Image (tube, helix red, strand yellow):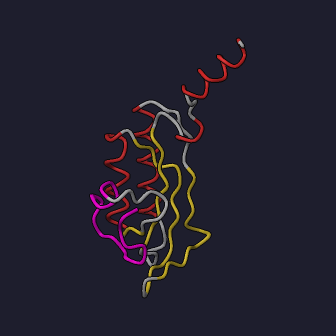
Amino acid sequence: MLGNRGKLYDNAKAFFELDGNAVMKLSRGAAIDVCRGAAGQGIAVVKVEGGISSNDKFEARLDAIWDGADPPMDQNQADKTNTRAAAFIKSADSTYNAFVLTTSPITGYPHRQRNPRASVKRQLAEKA
């Protein structure tokens, strides 16, 4: 992430431009906007952590944690899970002014996707 980790961002566009996944603190409105726009960019919101941002610090609240569906998923499923994430943010205690979103490509978590190069190397090694 290239952005300022202490800052509370009020613009969903910054989340996508600065790769705010799992680290960027977003205002309630910005977090909801990210949820609304994520599926269109092939992204699913898989976790929401809400809390209070004050003086460049973030205090997470246990009653403001939401877990979504794990990818892989199709576009329709991503729209539904992201809509649920937005609804959760809207329903959170009104004193919670900051949200951290964890996202994944709808095709699945990158670290779980098969590495085609490693697969080819493995196949070559097995033939030798």
Q: Please tell me whether residue 94 is drawn above or below residue 116 in the rendered image.
A: below
Residue at (41, 43) in percent of width and height: 43
Q: Which quadrant of the figure contains the C terminus? A: top right
Q: Please tell me whether residue 34 is drawn above or below residue 110 in the rendered image.
A: below
Q: As drawn, which residue projects farthest toward the front?
A: 128
Residue 71 percent across, percent down from the top left = 53, 37
Specify whether residue 75 is painted magenta.
no
Residue 21 percent across, percent down from the top left = 44, 57
**Is 1 in front, or is 127?**
127
Residue 69 position by quadrant: top right
Residue 84 percent across, percent down from the top left = 46, 49
Residue 6 position by quadrant: bottom left
Q: Which quadrant of the figure contains the N terminus? A: bottom left
Residue at (60, 28) in percent of width and height: 118
Residue at (27, 58) in percent of width and height: 13
Stretch in magenta: 1-17
